[in-house]
Amino acid sequence: MAGPHRRGGPIGERQWWDPSDQAVVQEAVISAKTFGRGWMPVPMVANEERLDPYESIEGTEELRLVRNGRRLTALDEGSAWRQRSVGSLAVLRREVFGDPEEQRHRDCWQRQGDTMLTSVWQHRWLERDTPPGWIEARAKEEEITTRVLGGSAPSIDWFEIEDHTDPKGGGEVTSYQHLTIWAGRQHATLVVRHQLGIDLDVTLGAVGVALATDLV
């Protein structure tokens, strides 16, 4: 059960992961029920896992240095859920690092997360040969995170991205909620895409607390 075959990466990928850690990240920790009514699991058919999600992105050098120093030992990005009525999409990325000391990693994220996420979103559009529109990432308001995360707030960092890139020209603005859950060697990132104006704070607060609880 914990053998190399559990890794769902590219065909022919050379083994870099630890089988025991990989078995952990491929276990289900949340489900559609965690999100609540109207959410359902969806397959990640065309998803491309990135061992280093910040590679070649300007301004992320310090973060990459810290991440690489912790040494990735497991990765899974195969879980996603969609809200039936409005189409909001949640994608979970789970990682395990060899080094359990996370403070330097988290300090860097808290200091530079807004500028780095802005660069990441701009870079992803350019990868699709689409000029990015106005994009801004900002830390979620502390008043909101304290209310919906409660006692789990110390283990979660929450950023919100507003993206005005509109390839179809319909005037659409997209929001993304970006939650990072810190649990020593284990590390989870939940990204939720939704239309601007849809309030998912309470829903994602509950999901974030569930993740923070299950990863301990």
Image (cartoon, rainbow, N blue to C red):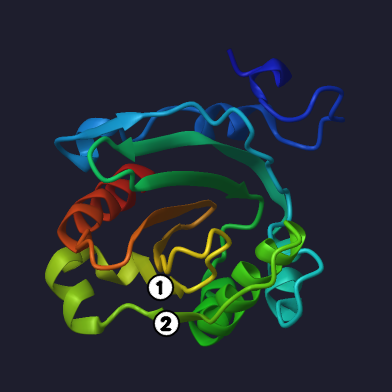
Q: Residue at x 29, y 54 (%)?
A: 208
| Residue at the farthest front position | 169
At mark 1, the secondary structure is strand
Q: Total label count?
A: 2
Looking at the picture, tell me which residue is in the foreground, 127 or 188.
Answer: 127
Classify 41 as above or below 3.
below
Please tell me the numbered disc located at residue 81: none
Classify 106 as above or below 74.
below
On the image, the x and y values in percent for residue 165 come to 54, 70
The answer to whether residue 198 of the structure is visible from this angle is: yes
Please tell me the numbered disc located at residue 159: 1
Q: Are marks 1 and 2 in contact (CB under 8 Å)?
A: yes
Residue highlighted by disc 2: 138
Left or right of 148 on screen, residue 162: right
Which kind of residue does numbered mark 1 sit on? Phe
Left or right of 132 on screen, residue 14: right
| Residue at the farthest top position | 1
At mark 2, the secondary structure is strand
Left or right of 61 on screen, residue 104: left
Q: Residue at x 34, y 38 (%)?
A: 82
Which kind of residue does numbered mark 2 sit on? Arg
* Quarter where residue 201 is shown: bottom left
Q: Residue at x 43, y 37 (%)?
A: 80
Cα distance in 3D space between marks 1 and 2: 5 Å
